[in-house]
Amino acid sequence: MSSPDADPRAADLPEGGEVLAHIPDEEAAMRAFAKRIAEVPEGEPIPNEIVQEGFTAMVRLYSVKFQLGERWEPFTEDSMVPATSAMIMCTTMMRAVNVEVFELGMWQSWSGA
């Protein structure tokens, strides 16, 4: 029997393994991020810590949905991100988790992502 707060979308992972995050928790983190952003006075810089919290929640939420089979583009058609910006983020994210480009390529070939 599953626990009452289990996320029903966490069942039957396409590639097996453990779910990377709990969707309701990440959705709550996104809402908390939105509140913190709204509290920053207009014209004041958004503190890096708040940006990090939001980015963490966004990455975790997107990746768990991807893991559960939801495949949609990370950017809307009307707000595409320049390739250089995407490469900067990919590079810094991979450094932060100590993953090399070779390892990414191997994971992509094994997972079919």
Image (tube, helix red, strand yellow):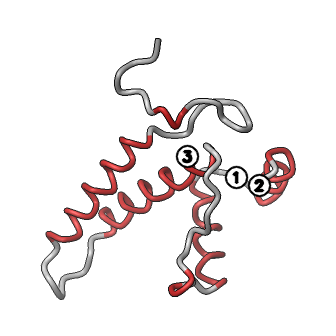
Which of pointers 3 and 1 lies earlier in the amino acid sequence?
3
User: Real-space Cα distance between discs 2 and 1?
Assistant: 7 Å
> Is 28 left or right of 110, judged from the image as shown?
left
Q: Which mark is residue 64?
A: 3
Quadrant in the rendering for residue 50: bottom left
> Is 83 left or right of 112, judged from the image as shown?
left
Please state, as top left, top right, bottom left or bottom right, where the C terminus lies in the image: bottom right
Amino acid found under the numbered disc labelled 1 = Val
Q: Nearer the viewer, residue 23 or 57?
A: 23
Q: Which mark is residue 104?
A: 2
Secondary-structure class at tag 2 = helix
Amino acid found under the numbered disc labelled 2 = Leu
Q: Which residue is labeled 1 in the image?
A: 99
User: Real-space Cα distance between discs 3 and 1?
Assistant: 19 Å
Secondary-structure class at tag 1 = loop
Q: Position of residue 112 (x, y in %)?
A: 81, 50
Amino acid found under the numbered disc labelled 3 = Val
